[in-house]
Image: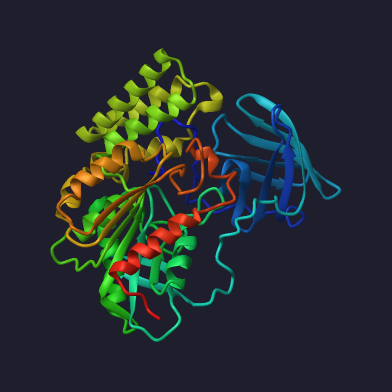
Amino acid sequence: MLVILIALTTAACSGSQPAPPVTPAITGNWNGILPLPDHPLPLGITFDGNGAALTVPEQGIFDMPLGAIDTDPAAVSFTAPGLPGDAGFHGRYDQDDLIGTFRQGGHDLPLTLHRGRVPTPPHPQDPPAQPPYAAEQVNYRSGDITIAGTLTLPVGSGPFPAVVMSTGSGPQDRDEEIDGHRPFAVIADALTRAGYAVLRTDDRGVGGTGGQLATADYTDLTDDITAGLNYLRGRADIDGNRIGLFGHSEGGYLAPLVASRPDARIAFVIMMAGPALPGDEILFEQNDLLLRAAHVDEQTMARKLGYVATLTRTIRSGDTDRVRELAEQNNATLPPEQKQPQTAIDRLSTENFDALVDYDPAPALRRLRMPVLAFYGGTDVQVPAKSNAPAATADLAADPNADVHVFPGLNHLMQPSPTGMPSSYRTNSITIAPEVLSYVTDWLGRYIVPAH
């Protein structure tokens, strides 16, 4: 579940106003080192025809849109609406450098930007640019919107068994890119090499997919998955009777919900860190674990968890105005460096977030009667294995082909991580632990014979 109410987050801001023209001398990629007292921080800025964007690889920020952009060489400036603390830059163009000051949370730090991209950590599991299989860019309709994605096809003529992937919460692209990692691209690569066609798609309002995620409830999102199933069943190279679902995090809510429909014709379900508890309980437990990991004092913890409990209860009541009021009041109590951007506050009162908070996965899980694999990371603090694995085992007890598995020492992305904290994503060179990929492909091969 890539949703945390208390932890500091970054959020991209977008608007309907066209980006201002960028001065040619400023156009391109820039990088520099922000001299933080405890750790110098590399960052990058890209100016192009669409405006400007910020990348801070170590903090998991990639191409975050910037605002209030001025590229006058004598007075280069921008704001970072997605960062807390009223962040922004003011400086000048001087002999092919941008020299100025970065301000955040009332603190000013000198920053000089040079030509070139900011270095990003290597991710050796990323699929090669030219993989040993076909990759098609596909589009199809889901109601009034167009879904865009990538379909990878094994070597051979088919018809192939197939997997439809469903991402975690929040706006995700087809690779589910986070902190520079592309877990869905890595999983799709492993499954396609093993003999399965894989369809992965951009969420609503992301990449090539239309619509808006904020206004989409679980009926909309499961309809989008069903549209992918129907698209694949209309292709001669796909075996329509051997299509299954793979859902990560919130996608682990949606995949069983689709599969539990009487007419769904789903061959298997794979849940990667798929919650088996209601959404409000997941969010409360997330925040409890994160606050304990931060060694917050008991009084502060009680206050913050009280806020989470009140907020989720109010969301479930449907009082949108009160939800916004609570979120604004809580934000006002935070120090400048911890204040949430407006986009994060706005999300709490959307139909999409309401659907997550209000959902109980137990009824759908109890109806499943096809092969189901539900696996969890032992150190995951976002969908903790300690509570979710037993709940999944209980709900899947009547399914003779259900397997609930916990991988010790892995986090929410199935990376090796002793703490399981989200901050471990960006510093980890591993995207998906190899033992996870092997377990999934071996399990799937026992039920669905791959193409050869």
The answer to which image quadrant residue 235 occupies is bottom left
**Left or right of residue 366: residue 59:** right
User: Measured from the top left, where is residue 173 in percent x and y?
Assistant: 45, 57
Colour treatment of the image: rainbow
User: Measured from the top left, where is residue 263 in percent x and y?
Assistant: 15, 67
Going 33% across and 49% down the picture, which residue do you hit? 405
User: Measured from the top left, where is residue 303 in percent x and y?
Assistant: 37, 17
Q: How many marks?
A: 0
User: Measured from the top left, where is residue 171 in percent x and y?
Assistant: 42, 51
Going 20% across and 62% down the picture, which residue do you hit? 370
Q: Nearer the viewer, residue 384 or 281?
A: 384
Above or below, 365 relative to 59: below
Of the 4 image quadrants, the one containing the C terminus is bottom left
**Left or right of residue 22: residue 309:** left
Which residue reaches farthest bottom? 157
Q: Nearer the viewer, residue 351 or 384?
A: 384
The answer to which image quadrant residue 311 occupies is top left
- Is residue 174 something one can see in this rendering? no
